[in-house]
Image: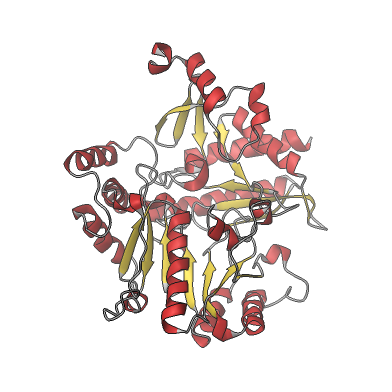
Amino acid sequence: MDDLMHNDPARVIEADRAHVWHHMIQHRALETTDPRIIVEGRGMRVWDITGREHLDAVSGGVWTVNVGYGRERIADAVRDQLVKMCYFAGAQGTVPGARFAETLIAKMPGLSRVYFANSGSEANEKAFKMVRQIAHKHHGGRKSKILYRERDYHGTTIACLSAGGQMERNAQYGPFVPEFVMVPHCLEYRAQDGLAGEDYGVRAAEAIEEVILREGPDTVGALCLEPITAGGGIILPPEGYWEKVQEICRKYDILLHIDEVVCGMGRTGTWFGYQQFGVKPDIVTMAKGVASGYAAISCCVTTEAVFEKFKDASDPMAHFRDISTFGGCASGPVAALENLAILEEENLLDNSTRMGAYLQEGLRGLMEKHALIGDVRGKGLFAGAELVADRGTRAPAAEALVQAVVADCLKQGVIIGATNRSVPGFNNVLLFAPALIAGKAEIDEILAAVDGALGRVAG
């Protein structure tokens, strides 16, 4: 135990292998290979327990550490707050909670109320519950259906998986919650039969309207969408899509719920991804980049109109009767305040726009060199490169080949991502989401690693 307490590498690895159940991996491999233990991070670089340095091109693996590692001002603020007042249940308030809510709402014109929770899944659950309660209170229970999009992802709970458009993520976890209904994806590179061609964005949105009409507009309460589909392949909605979606939601009195868990807090170059498209949502959820991983926090943000639906004091069942235990932790909003201040003071939204354009330009350059790349897409420092076996047919590259590219980059000391247990047959997109502090030197290092990996893997 003394060796473990003093971080003896062999003992830590032994303890990890014996007792830790890691996320999203097959553990059989760890019977013959040491688990990777990350022990330190500074800027965009992390070091494992063996001392090996890596450039992190995925912000903590799941697009979270937006302001980079080693931010002492965030850690100091969290420590000070924990000593002063660590927690009180959310029926009461805290100073950092009030301050962060006010600061956040200033970045989100048209929205006014912040419900604190501790994960993206939980924030989305809160939104789903709000929609269902509104249906019961104001629509006789009828507008309870929630639409979600193929390839989108909204979290790990059973309700969130019920709203999940990634079939491999959902597999073997059913039966699911009823009255969640899927609408078609909007990936133009793989446009559905009958929708491809000019004005694809409008037609893809009209496909949502077809589902609404099939289900019955008076039964649909909300439409939940990612502004840019993340783990389903970095799907940037085509021109005309969002305008039509907004029009459809207003036409049928459907709440528009935008899931900003990944895209929020500057990832795309604006505070929130929906702001790239002029969308006016009724509900916005966020997590990952809200505090850049320095504390656990998520938010479900609504318009005042949504909030007002829960204020019938004559009905003891009218208020939102829900709680998030760790939504009461004061460390979350205090970390979020410092995180937001860093984003502003260092102009990181502008940097995301500029360096994102540089990254995508570089990926398109690699596309000219490597036939494996069939498509490059993204916004800001959030990009994907879809690998194909044949550009003419757009047949997806084999998953083993895609993972070989990721593994080769890792050997070079660069951590990139790929779609993982997402869409059957289409786990073929390389994913890039470096911290918003990335400069040209770091982007060049990422591109060089991918270039070398593609050359070696493709032969």
Model colouring? secondary structure
Corner quadrant of residue 33 = top right
Q: Furthest residue to the top?
A: 2
Residue 171, image x and y in percent? Answer: 68, 52
Corner quadrant of residue 7 = top left
Q: Is residue 366 above or below residue 235?
A: above
Corner quadrant of residue 210 = bottom right
Q: Is residue 167 above or below residue 317?
A: above
Q: Is residue 221 above or below residue 18?
A: below
Nearer to us in this view, 25 or 192: 25
Q: Furthest residue to the left?
A: 84
Viewed as shown, does residue 135 lie left or right of 88?
right
Residue 177, image x and y in percent? Answer: 58, 64
Q: Quadrant of the C terminus?
A: top right
At 57% across and 60% down in the image, what residue appears? 229
Residue 292, image x and y in percent? Answer: 39, 46
Q: How many marks?
A: 0
At 63% across and 74% down in the image, what residue appears? 201
Q: Quadrant of the N terminus?
A: top left
Q: Is residue 50 above or below residue 402?
A: above
Residue 344, image x and y in percent? Answer: 30, 54
Residue 353 seen in this snapshot: no
Viewed as shown, does residue 19 lie left or right of 385?
left
Residue 316 seen in this snapshot: yes
Nearer to us in this view, 44 or 317: 317
Viewed as shown, does residue 138 lie left or right of 96?
right
